[in-house]
Amino acid sequence: GIMLPLTNEEQRVVFYATTDEPTIPSSVTPDTPLSELNLNWRERDLPEKLRTRHVHRLHPYLGKFIPQLVEVFLRKYFSPGQTVLDPFSGSGTTLVQANELGVNAIGYDVSAFNALLATAKTKHYDLKTVRQEILDILDAARHATQAGGLQLSLWSTNGNGNGHGPAANSDYLQRWFAPQALQELLAYRDQIQNYRNQEILKIILSRSARSARLTTHFDLDFPKAPQTEPYWCYKHSRTCMPTTTAYQFLKHYSLDTMARLEEFAGQRTNATVIIKHEDSRLADIPPIDGVITSPPYVGLIDYHEQHRYAYELLRLQDKSESEIGAAKRGSSQKAQRTYQESIAEVFRRACGAMPAGGILIVVAGDKFGLYDEIARLCEVEVEAVLKRHVNRRTGRRASEFYESVFVWRKP
Ligand SMILES: C[S@@+](CC[C@H](N)C(=O)[O-])C[C@H]1O[C@@H](n2cnc3c(N)ncnc32)[C@H](O)[C@@H]1O
């Protein structure tokens, strides 16, 4: 691997992997030395299928960390019955992994969609009921979009009350979906209120909407403008057409979701999971034993914007003004300073909720070198910084870089 020159101070705490064989996550115990960890998994060590198993792929989400990375640190630092906090819980990776190992988990996220997704993943379901509901609403949506039913859906004031039909209240929805696709999505949405397991139905709807947008297949993360004409597709190396319907996605993801919930049900424990839709800088955190998290980075991703379709369809509350490090606010010196103070405020609060000696595991691609100062601001002891070689081979976003895993202790 590439070694960067280190100062004396850094040599004490900074570790690059010294063994060639990547760590097998399930083999880690509290006695595994940090210096023996090799977190540089390649595709063949940790194939996509394992990284995205069961509920980890209930819905796409840009900026997740690898479940197995979390597993390593849960096994090393936490025991069943303890409580881990993730103050930036995102799609809920820490919460899901903690639950599998019998560790209680508390997550905060300022994005309503992320809180919804994490809740849908970790909710304790009655599988028979949830399966019935998923199939029933699919059927109801299909009926509602057939001739006749379609008229009803188009002109009902169900939840909109503006008299212009359900689609007219959102320019975004009008612009980003073909008329038929939008009818189908709205028909599904308007049925959700009739069911008990609304979170998971909303996730199926959102995932379908994401796929049914008028975008190219190769730019599903941040499409700039609707694609209404055939286009050359880099992903499939042929000419593709933007989709005009959504029902096929609703059906496909309904079946996929049921399979994923069933698989997770076989592996989950009764450990508690609490998810709060809150700004963690303002959170009143209950007692915890430690933290595992990957904070938003400065100027990198707009977390609300990446799921804009879900906010529009589900009318979720927008708190994007409280996002730390939002891409739209850039990465100027001033933005970096504000970022450091915000992140430090969150960790100060977390430290206030844990005993002395408690552990904080913070995963960040610290390109601007902001975390030494953050550690100083929140007065933690820096026990180690593990450098993890990340090699992404996913299509046009292929990249290679080092990510840091900061191991901090509350003094
Ligand atoms: C890097 S992502 C975490 C991803 C997560 N580890 C996962 O695997 O899904 C950072 C998260 O921090 C959230 N966030 C940003 N500002 C926040 C704030 N002030 N309070 C709580 N969460 C915030 C974002 O919405 C985003 O979901």
Image (tube, rainbow, N blue to C red):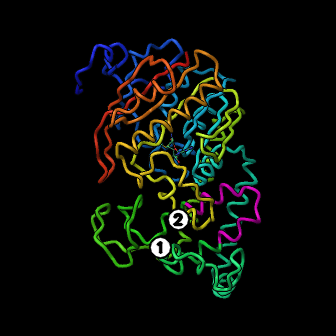
Discs 2, 1 touching: Cβ within 8 Å: yes
Whether 328 is drawn above or below 80: the answer is below
Q: Is residue 19 left or right of residue 335?
A: left
Q: In this rendering, is residue 75 above or below 190?
A: above
> In the rendered structure, which amino acid carries the disc numbered 2?
Tyr
Amino acid at circle 1: Trp
The span picked out in magenta is 188-206
Query: Which image quadrant is residue 135 in?
Result: bottom right
Is residue 292 shown in magenta?
A: no
- Residue 375, image x, y percentages: 46, 25
Number of other residues with Cα within 10 Å of mark 1, as a class: few under 14, some 14 to 19, many 20 or more: many
Which corner quadrant of the image does residue 88 belong to?
Answer: top right
Residue 347's disc number = none
Q: Which residue is mark 1?
A: 176
The residue sitting at 52% across, 34% down in the picture is: 293
Instruction: State the image coordinates of residue 357 (x, y, percent, origin top left).
Output: 58, 15
Residue bearing mark 2: 309
